[in-house]
Amino acid sequence: MYRPLLLAGAALASSPVASGIAGAQDGGATVARMRPVADPDRMAARIEAQMTDAERTGMLIGIMPIPFPDVPDVPAGLPVTAGWVNGVPRLGVPPLAETDASLGVTNPGQLRPGDTATALPAGLALASSFDSDLAERAGAMIGSESRAKGFNVLLAGGVNLTRDPRNGRNFEYLGEDPLLAGRMGGHAIRGIQSQGVISTIKHFVLNGQETQRYTANSIIDPDALRESDLLAFQIGIEIGRPASVMCAYNLVNGAPSCGNAAMLNDVLKRDWGYKGWVMSDWGAVDGVDFLMKGLDQQSGAQLDKQRWFDGPLKQGLANGSIPRERVSDAVRRILRGIYAVGADRQPGNAPIDKAANAQVALEAARAGIVLLKNDGVLPLAEQARTILVVGGNALFGVLSGGGSSQVTANGDAPQVLHPGGEGLDGQLSRQVYFASSPVKALRAALPKATIGFANGYSVGTAAAMAAKADMVVVFATKWEGELYDSGSIDLPQGQDALIAAVAKANRNTVVVLETGNPVAMPWLDEVRAVVQAWYPGQEGGTAIADVLTGRSNPSGRLPMTWPRSLVDDPRPQIPGLGLPFRTPVDVRYTEGAAVGYRRIDRDPNAVLFPFGHGLSYTRFSHSAPTIRGRNAYDLTVSVTVRNDGDRAGADVPQVYLVERGGRPLKRLVGFQRVVLQPGESRTIAMTVDGRLLSDFRDRRWTNPAGRYVFAVGTSATGLEQTVSVVLPQRTAAP
Ligand code: BGC
């Protein structure tokens, strides 16, 4: 739960977090279990059978132990963190010490004084790497920090698809494509859980905008949902096996996500056979009946109108209105997760290797930077003598996204801006710049150049200084955060005018963007290069300088379509924007499963850069693809990639289904990042997931018989050679 309130005066001494997790006990003896138990289902059944009813129900409710002024009943002695669920010490069941989230271990309100953590770049940066191995290592890194700090649950794994380029939380997520988001999210979860820390996958499901997030009713064709947002979750769950799914605030087709039997009981637990537990989002539960609809645990219960899974649950159990078996099932699901992951192990107490973890953050930031445009001006020439950097607070550091995922980063103290003002964005705006200076990093990388800085507040001054430099690099930032969507895709605070004026004064102008979403670029034709750095994390300044100077060859690819404007958007206005907080509003996802680039009928003029786009300082070529297999569930597409340039670099060949039975369509069905030395070539084989060739109808995946045409390319529109195959119809389980 993100609380905008500033906590001056509310600071508490932090409890030693590591003391929070009891040592696991088995048969009375305390053991430090070093690996998950072999049969978590049996273990869960055995432990649950020994519980009293009070012990059972106690596991189904959690609190938010953060002493924010508007959060009541916070017991003393717990660590200040997002969530806490009591354990059952008698049976060796550990408490669940829950922390946010995907970009690093957070410290809400900085109420654990001095407790900093390694801050990864935005989820969108990780997604831009198209590198599932990197996602897994990044997950393992934050998992290990969680464990070392005494937390055994990370509220990570945000895989909500980008359906609105103004969504304030897109930066936490993994883009618009179900295969990309599911695969990257699944690997990040796998990495986290490899450290004995449970991960969630969230927010289930179709939490597509922050505006009116508690009352927005996401309306979509249920089959289209299976082919899009649900498919991202399904793939993520199959790869990562997260012990828990966090349901969302919004409603889906009229029923609250956390009390949505169609989503939780039917899709997740019945059709997918999910064995873990469903925890609510913080303040998303409206009644004890949610238990029967598939919710297993009420989180952050003080934020709901009632502690539903306490008194009302106990009453229901006693009077028989709530079946005992349902309660036992919910408890076994939680226990199973604990034992499957090894979250009952004692916290490692291992010292955190900050330097090694910073390298992971640096690698992720470099891999996530997308070179959108370059007419050859980049990498910065060694001979440029005077370079002027303008704007974006770039002398100090790099911007990060706001909300519950906000990490208090290692390194020097951040700069925090509170612009204030009315409305949610006024209250919520807490803009944190991590102390990683792109200017200092550029000065270190280019010792022979004179690198100046104009803060950009005065357009005239910046333009006058720009006119005297050999080169200009303008940094533009746009803060985004939880609970709040931007009303447009424009850069705020006159930055467009600044860029245009500087570019007019000096034609060697490069723009670096630090944003949590695509932004309009009215000045695009006037600048020579554009670098999308997203929110690049605690090592962001270094990563940006590395890319600008060519020390790191950019390899990021866009995980979402970059619109030129919103004229072609399915929802030109954000439903509910500007209405009073908690106004019920319908959000109609009429595009169905045709999210982002999949809407092939969209006006090409409405797209500035396609999904999958990203440039390099070297050149790659792709052979004609070949295909092997006899049906939709048995297909492999292979392509040989060659580095034709004179620098090492990484390419991300992408395979799209472009035609099926004579009809055009567009779906990403395979991708792989491959690092190649100059002149090196490699053949990669990509296994196709049959669901991506199918439609979801009548509770089954079915692919029609006919000819399937696949194209290999550099983006959703940069398609090269094709290959086709005739496939029989097949159906597959949901
Ligand atoms: C957010 C979740 C987060 C939880 C706990 C909620 O407001 O939506 O993503 O994990 O709070 O902080």
Image (spheres, rainbow, N blue to C red):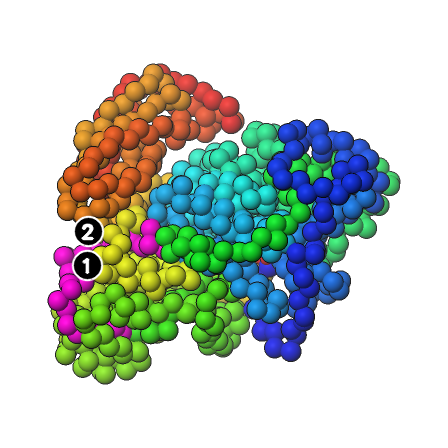
Query: Which range is magenta?
Result: 365-390
Confirm whether residue 212 shows in the render: no
Question: Residue placed farthest to the right in the image?
Answer: 319
- 179 w.r.t. 360: above or below: above
Residue that mark 1 sits on? 379
**221 or 526, which is in the foreground?**
526
Residue kind at label 1, given as amino acid type: Pro
Q: Are marks 2 and 1 in contact (CB under 8 Å)?
A: yes
Residue 619 tag number: none
Local secondary structure at mark 1: loop
User: Dot 1: few (<14), some (14–19), or many (≥20) neighbours within 10 Å?
Assistant: many
Q: Residue at x 79, y 36 (%)?
A: 27
Q: Position of residue 386 (x, y in %)?
A: 17, 74
Disc 2 beta carbon < 8 A from ligand 1? no
Write down the quadrant of residue 336 in the picture. top right
Name the N-terminal-most of marks 2 and 1: 1
Q: Residue at x 66, y 59 (%)?
A: 17
User: Which quadrant, please, contains the N terminus?
Assistant: bottom right
Q: Position of residue 518 (x, y in %)?
A: 33, 57
Q: Is residue 370 magenta?
A: yes
Q: Position of residue 650 (x, y in %)?
A: 26, 44
Q: Residue at x 21, y 42 (%)?
A: 677
User: Dot 2: few (<14), some (14–19), or many (≥20) neighbours within 10 Å?
Assistant: many
Residue kind at label 2, given as amino acid type: Tyr
Residue that mark 2 sits on? 617
Give me the C-alpha separation between circle 2 and circle 1: 7 Å
Please tell me how many numbered marks the rendered image carries: 2
